[in-house]
């Protein structure tokens, strides 16, 4: 584990760059015959949930055998943008936002019931939403999922000059929003919340001071852009 400031700047964390099987913290190839989807829920990851490193952190509480099939795909007419709140580890996380003509890279986590419950526990400040008839390109092949699920930021997304801001670290074709790295968006937040501090001090204070983190999140939420697209909100965390 890197130091806390470097960790915050590293969001959304490394990804394998391909579909994979997450098994007990390891990244393995998905079996050629595929996997049984019947008892699993497809959850589209907008940010750090794409990363095997983040999955290892979230599921380290599990004992025994753990397997999560993860498919790399492209989601049509959405982009991954910065949510208007802070994670407890100091990063500004992500959320999906409608973006006509954009094709954004995503990873589809196929979670069983216990794995899904654990994911809910880690997604504070989000709603759990259902999407109907989702068009995705999985491993190069277009597929329509009758129903898929996402986590959406409750307060909306960061507003910079009237626009959402996409995650530079996540690839997208036909991107229409400006993009920033995690370091750049954190610096934007610093300028709004604590302009006299240097960036690393600001990040460290966010991590160590929940009160400050809440105040800075409130500042970002003051002019946050709401997430307005067709979805069914199933739960709020």
Image: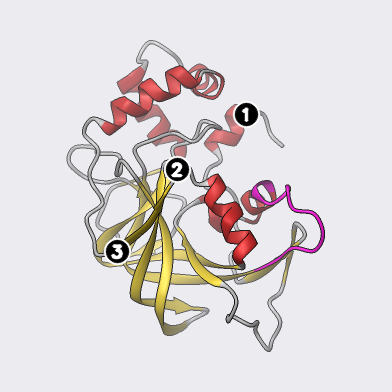
Q: Is residue 84 magenta?
A: no
Q: Where is residue 144 in the image (x, y as percent from the top left)?
A: 39, 83
Position above or below: 137 against 161: below
| Element marked by disc 3 | loop
Relative to 19, residue 140 above or below: below
Q: Name the residue under label 2.
A: 93
> Dot 1, crowdedness within 10 Å: few (<14), some or many (≥20)?
some
Per the image, the residue denoted by label 3 is 231
Instruction: Say which residue appears at 62% left-offset and 68% top-offset.
Output: 112
Q: Most prominent secondary structure in the magenta stretch?
A: loop
Quarter holding the C terminus is: top left
Please, what secondary structure does the residue beneath circle 2 have?
loop
Residue occupying the point 60% across, 57% down: 15
Going from N to C along the chain, the mark reached first, 2 or 1, is: 1
Taking the view exactly as shown, the residue that stands out farthest to the top is 196
Image quarter where the N terminus lies is top right
* Residue holding disc 1: 4
Q: How far apart are marks 3 and 1 (CA)?
A: 35 Å
Judge left or right: residue 155 versus residue 150.
left
Where disc 1 sits, the SS reads: helix
Badge 3 density bin: few <14, some 14–19, many ≥20, Cα 10 Å: some
Marked residue nearer the N-terminal end (2 or 3): 2
Residue 49 appears anywhere in the view? yes
Residue range of the region highlighted in magenta in the rendering: 57-68
- Disc 2 and disc 3: Cα gap in Å? 20 Å
Q: 126 or 221: which is nearer to us?
A: 126
Residues packed near mark 2 inside 10 Å, few (<14), some (14 to 19) or many (20 plus): many
């Amino acid at each position: 584990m890197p130091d806390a400031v470097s960790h915050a700047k590293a969001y959304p964390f490394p990804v394998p760059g391909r579909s994979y099987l997450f098994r007990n913290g390891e990244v393995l190839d998905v079996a050629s015959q595929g996997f049984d989807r019947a008892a699993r829920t497809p959850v589209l990851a907008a940010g750090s949930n794409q990363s095997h490193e983040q999955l290892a952190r979230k599921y380290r509480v599990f004992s025994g055998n753990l397997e999560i099939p993860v498919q790399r795909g492209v989601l049509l007419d959405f982009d991954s943008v910065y949510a208007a709140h802070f994670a407890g580890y100091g990063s500004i996380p992500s959320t999906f936002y409608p973006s006509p003509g954009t094709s954004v890279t995503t990873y589809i986590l196929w979670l069983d019931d216990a794995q899904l419950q654990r994911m809910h526990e880690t997604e504070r400040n989000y709603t759990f939403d259902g999407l109907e008839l989702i068009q995705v390109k999985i491993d190069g092949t277009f597929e329509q999922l009758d129903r898929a699920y996402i986590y959406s930021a409750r307060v909306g997304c960061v507003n910079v000059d009237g626009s959402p801001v996409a995650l530079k670290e996540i690839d997208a074709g036909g991107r229409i929003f400006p993009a920033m790295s995690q370091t750049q968006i954190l610096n934007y937040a610093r300028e709004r919340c604590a302009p006299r501090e240097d960036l690393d001090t600001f990040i460290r204070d966010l991590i160590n001071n929940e009160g400050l983190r809440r105040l800075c999140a409130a500042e970002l939420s003051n002019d946050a852009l709401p997430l307005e697209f067709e979805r069914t909100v199933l739960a709020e965390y």
